Image (tube, coloured by chain):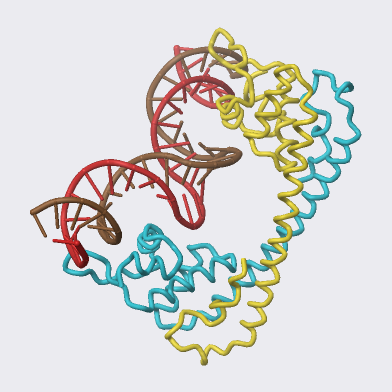
Chain colours: A cyan, B yellow, C brown, D red
Amino acid sequence: MRIGVLAAQAGVTAKTIRFYEDAGLLPEPPRTSGGYRHYPEEAVLRLAFIRDAQAAGLSLAEIRGVLAIRDGGQAPCAHVTDLIDQHLAQVEQRLVELGQARDALRALKRRAAATDPANCGSGEVCTILTAPAAST
Amino acid sequence: MRIGVLAAQAGVTAKTIRFYEDAGLLPEPPRTSGGYRHYPEEAVLRLAFIRDAQAAGLSLAEIRGVLAIRDGGQAPCAHVTDLIDQHLAQVEQRLVELGQARDALRALKRRAAATDPANCGSGEVCTILTAPAAST
DNA sequence: CTGGACCTTCCAGTGCACTGGAAGCTTTAT
DNA sequence: ATAAAGCTTCCAGTGCACTGGAAGGTCCAG
């Protein structure tokens, strides 16, 4: 199939497919006599995999690594398990940080509600924001 | 004071200060006869404000807006309150999404633990990742 | 045989907040 | 007098995942 058809079936743009090829995520497909890329059906599966892996939070570089292992004839299970563990740890860490950010913003909101504009001198920029959220 | 001293006191680099000036966050300071930037003490406060506002999650563009209001002689309270509300909403939204991502990753981890590499054909890329995490 | 849809390559830009480096000038210390 | 530290400007690059656009080639219907 041609790139436009593949793009439509995979739910990405033709631009993205060419970009993935450049980035080493898709092998170079054969060309027609006119120079058009000609993809086998399996290309849809590969693009679907890329999407699933992205949804799991893997970067394109990580996905390239997984694909390279598979393309090398190995089952990438161990590698994938590592990546999942790494990302889970990162996500949990990020959840903690975001929770703290939320708490800080709630504190700022309370302070904002208690702030009278008339009390703000022009010496500082904004008494609501100054000082308290500086823990991150 | 000169840029290096200000940088040290504010905990940023001289590069960053020049960048902030270009970005409209800091006014152009007077120059010495040799062309060196010469900052008043208050510059430290302004940089501290920028840091606090960043810690609260505001972008430089938003901070520029707050500073512009203050520099225009107004108290930016209402504007700041709006920004805080917006960011709080964004952070809470992001917390929900990240929580979902965490759940998806945990599901992947369970599946990975239950996957035997011997069962992976070479037809697909990786059965652990394919299909399930597609909700995000 | 012509128009339009589709394809090709290549270069550049997006957003964000800086960071790096080169080439040259000023200031301070010795 | 000279070296070193610090400053100046300007241009370019970082990371990420694309996206936009120009200039041109190909394929198919009518």
Q: Taking B58 as reference, is B16 left or right?
A: left
Name, please, the residue furthest toward the right: A114
Q: Taking B97 as reference, is B85 left or right?
A: right
Q: Quadrant of the C terminus of chain B?
A: bottom right
Residue at the image point whose x is 69% and y is 74% from the top: B106
Residue A32: image location, x then y, percent: 20, 69
Residue A5: image location, x then y, percent: 35, 68
Figure check: B101 above or below B124: above
Q: Taking A34 as reference, is A52 left or right?
A: right
Figure check: A44 above or below A132: below
Residue B14: image location, x then y, percent: 60, 29
Q: Quadrant of the N terminus of chain B?
A: top right
Residue C1: image location, x then y, percent: 8, 54
The front one of B107 and C8 is C8
Residue at the image point whose x is 67% and y is 29% from the top: B65
Residue at the image point whose x is 74% and y is 20% from the top: B42
